[in-house]
Amino acid sequence: MKIAIPQWQDRVSPVFDVAGNLLVVDVANGREEARLKVDLTATEPLRRAQQVAGLAPDVLICGAISWPLEMALTSAGVRVISHICGGIDEVLEAFANGNLADERFIMPGCCRRRHMRGRRYRHGGLGGPRGVR
């Protein structure tokens, strides 16, 4: 599985649309195998989505993201988990443990808090199927 996270100062970048780089983490059998930092050069939503999709991530974990960019990524087969904040390693661990819905990872002031009450990201470990319940 490949997990992509836009990063800024070792944290999830607050706005994906203008993020300068992307961390792509390869995970197999529940273990991190490699990390690759990729500069994001495209600024137009469709081109940015194509650039990210070209890296073949299974999931993009990000902060705020515009609707056109999210739809373009989703159409390209990339699962988007947005409005996430925190340190990169903490977010990766929370994703692996199914705890991204924890209050500390939801962006402050985000209306998503209302919609996420009682929901948890679940996926049976890094190697299992992913979904939102």
Image (cartoon, rainbow, N blue to C red):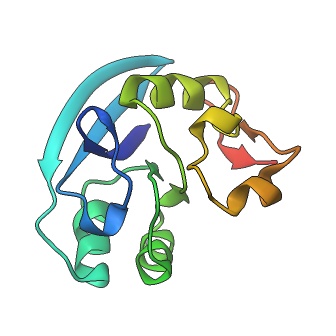
Quadrant of the image containing the N terminus: top left
In the image, residue 29 lies at what x, y percent?
Answer: 49, 18
Residue at horizontal 31%, vertical 80%? 45
Q: Please, which residue is most extreme toward the front here?
A: 109
- Lateral position of residue 25 relative to residue 41, left or right: right
Front residue of 127/99: it is 99
Residue at horizontal 70%, vertical 34%? 102
Q: Please, which residue is most extreme toward the right here?
A: 118
Front residue of 110/55: it is 110
Looking at the picture, does residue 67 appear above or below residue 37? Answer: below
Residue at horizontal 16%, vertical 40%? 37
Residue at horizontal 28%, vertical 43%? 7
Front residue of 21/105: it is 105
Kindly tell me whether residue 37 is visible in this rendering.
Answer: yes
In the image, residue 121 lies at what x, y percent?
Answer: 71, 40
Q: Quadrant of residue 32?
A: top left
Front residue of 39/14: it is 14
